[in-house]
Image (cartoon, grey):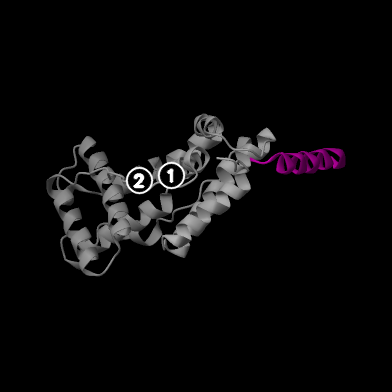
Amino acid sequence: MEEKNINRLLKLCDEYFLQNRHCKNYIQHCKNTWYKGILSFMNELGVEDYSPDIGQKYLQSASGALLVEKYPRVIRRGIHMLDDLFNIGRIRRRCYTKTDFPLEGEIGGLAKGFIAYLQVSGRKEHTLYNHRRHLSRLVSYLTDKSIARVAEMEESHLFSYMSAVQLEKRSVTISIKGFVRYLKNNRIIGNGLDYFLDNFKAHDKERIPSFYSEAEILRIEGILKSATYRV
């Protein structure tokens, strides 16, 4: 294909989504993620022409690996779309097989009931999938701690699990709190987890210094130098 400019390729990706009637929120999420990802990576390299080789280098880079871990489907789909445009001039449809996140044992069975309740309430498929993903990991964590029955689940277990969660912390919190409220509303548990429901707040993780832009680093250094001179 003759077109290689990354900005124009990303524009073609936008048009593909619109033509295939993807929802606006999803399109905006993809755009934000790609612009922070591959476009920022290429700007740092000082190149504007995309190639599949650059796409693979991005996925293997530190910044790329971080976003792939957080948004695996969006990031990889973006690179596949760019590769298709580069190689064949059009974007192919791709089929994905979702990972089956098991919900086993007593707590897993109750989690299935919670997800079924959400389904009847009209939640979308991807929302149900995310709830299952988060709760499956919680059940696995509790199983590793030899917690097999819901009566054995204590606030300390939930606080300990949440302290270990590094990605999608707000989303995980919504799933777990929703599950706990479901258990309470159905009188499966009492008030023993109320402190967690009322007091645990998810906080976004602050960016580590290595992911600040060059301009931000220079500005921070200037502030530090100014403070040093005043002292």
| Type of amino acid under label 1 | Arg
- Which span of residues is magenta-colored? 212-231
> Mark 1 or 2, which is nearer the eye?
2
Q: Position of residue 53 (x, y in %)?
A: 54, 29
Q: Position of residue 75 (x, y in %)?
A: 46, 43
Does residue 204 show up?
A: yes
Seen from the viewer's position, the closer of residues 153 and 111 is 111
Instruction: Name which quarter of the figure residue 80 lies in.
Output: top left
| Residue, far right | 229
Seen from the viewer's position, the closer of residues 47 and 146 is 47
Q: Quadrant of the C terminus?
A: top right
Disc 2 residue crowd, few under 14, some 14–19, many 20+, Cα 10 Å:
few
Q: CA distance from mark 1 to mark 2?
A: 9 Å
Helix, strand or loop at label 2? It is loop
Instruction: Name which quarter of the figure residue 210 lies in.
Output: top right
111 left or right, relative to 41: left
157 part of magenta stretch: no
Numbered badge on residue 77: 1
Q: Position of residue 24 (x, y in %)?
A: 47, 64
Q: Quadrant of the N terminus?
A: top right
* Contact, mark 1 vs mark 2 (Cβ under 8 Å): yes
Numbered badge on residue 94: 2
Does residue 207 show up?
A: no
Disc 1 residue crowd, few under 14, some 14–19, many 20+, Cα 10 Å:
few
Instruction: Name which quarter of the figure residue 4 lies in.
Output: top right
221 part of magenta stretch: yes
21 left or right, relative to 56: left
